[in-house]
Image: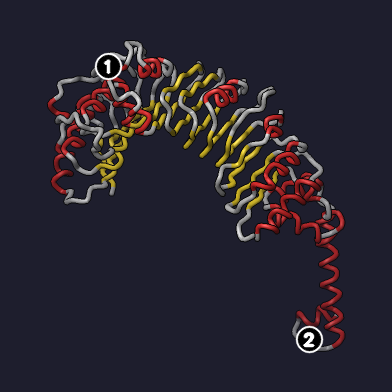
Amino acid sequence: APCILEMLGQFNPDSEAMSTCKKARAKSTSVVSSDRLSSLPPEIKGDILSRLNVEEAVRTSTLSSTWRDAWTNMPKIFLRDGNFARTKFVTLVDMVLSLHKGTVEKFDISGSKTYHDEFGRWMLMLSRRSPRSIIMELKSEPGYRIPSCLFSMGDLEFLHLQNCIISLPLVFQGFKRLTRLSLKSFSSTDMDIQNLISFCPVLSYLELASFEGINHLTVQAPKLKLLYVVGDVEDINFDAPNLEVAALFLDQKAIAHHSDPTALHKESYAKQLVGSLSDIKTLAITGFLLRYLSKGCILTKLPAVFARLENIYLAICFGDQRQFLAACSLFQNAPNLKKLDFWSQSLSTWDQDQARIKEFTVQVQLDHLVTASVQGFRGLDCEVDFVAKLLSWAPALEELKIEWKGKTECSMVLAKLLALPRVSPRAKVIVTF
């Protein structure tokens, strides 16, 4: 009754009866909420906890007795040192790994503080939980040496390591279930990386970026579909018959290793590399590799036809005739090319063979090309000349998008671009700023 009178404005809220009413109502609500939380099925609790970081998940133990140990069965563990003091973060990680009772589907740890003394202990405790996915991004130098216990985790399906030293144990059975491997800012050896990759029979995704100690990279992976390599290597050998996407961004130092054209054998590294990629659908390479492909000769024929190649991304200097002609050779051998993306790079000391593109009489048939883009466009004559060539080669072209990055007045350049003849009646030239 007092509650009803309060709602009608006919009751003094300061009365003792009203106070009793409020307390009773609050207690009732609390009991109902507690009962609802306590009665949630385990899978719902697990889903809730999987959306929290570990610190927040541990705090749920105060909700009720049924939640006290719920976090110890959470399938996904996310650990970030963030604003934690180092000692508190170490205590948290130790507690989580020692008290966790269930299967770990995903273990994700990152931090900027130094944990070299604890890292081996953490990996040993983690190995006893049979994780399926590991993401490790501990950024403090020097790199973290990966202990042998990690290489015994036979249930791994996803492995991402950053800032680490990889040395395989003498006995390595491989990762039989691993489908995705990502290694960044790491050091290793030719043999260890070759064995690591080849002992992953169902590997479909491989990323190797910013590495040291690898001179001759061998990728033997029968199920591999996507390969991403950024780094300094002298050569790369592929045995990946199902490869569909290859992104190769080799450092300038790597190309310098073979800067002497006379040092290349007839069946050169470049031709072997290109020939091994003949079945891919998407290719991304840098201008340095383009120059590498053309060392010793101006390529007019490549050792393979890329019948399945539909998408190409090139970081290229249009002012370097070697890069331009090597790119043309690539286009000529990709009869089903549908999409082209370019990143225009500035002229460097490497680019000494300069000539106006419009002076070349080379003709390329891009019969199936539908869309193209040029990023980093600065309005240089060589860039405008290339756009003119592209518009004259592609009878099915529908859109050419140009991202303007020039620092000078663009009106005259834009007028030139819009006035260029087009072999495709549907071709639209779109310039963005």
Decide which of 91, 57 is in the foreground and name it: 91
Residue type pointed to by label 2: Pro
* Mark with earlier residue (1, 2): 2
Position above or below: 33 against 187: below
Which residue does the numbered mark 2 point to in the structure image? 13
Is residue 176 in view from this perspective? no
Colour style of the rendered protein structure: secondary structure
Q: Quadrant of residue 402?
A: top left
Q: In the shown orientation, is residue 376 left or right of residue 165?
A: left
With respect to residue 104, does 370 lie above or below? above
Report x, y in % for residue 12: 79, 88
Q: Position of residue 411 (x, y in %)?
A: 16, 48
Mark number, residue 133: none
Work out whether residue 386 can be spotted: yes
**Rendered residue at 69%/32% (across/down):** 148
Q: What's the residue at 34%, 33% (across, down)?
A: 252
The residue where tag 1 is placed is 262
Q: Is residue 223 left or right of residue 38?
A: left
Judging depth in this view, the residue of 359 and 170 nearest the camera is 170
The reply to whether discs 1 and 2 touch (Cβ–Cβ < 8 Å) is no
Q: Position of residue 111 (x, y in %)?
A: 60, 51
Is 225 placed left or right of 174 in the picture?
left
Q: Give the residue at x 28% y 18%.
A: 332
Mark-to-mark CA distance, 1 and 2: 97 Å
Q: Is residue 65 above or below residue 344?
A: below
Q: How many marks?
A: 2
| Quarter where residue 199 is shown | top right
Dot 1: what SS? Answer: helix
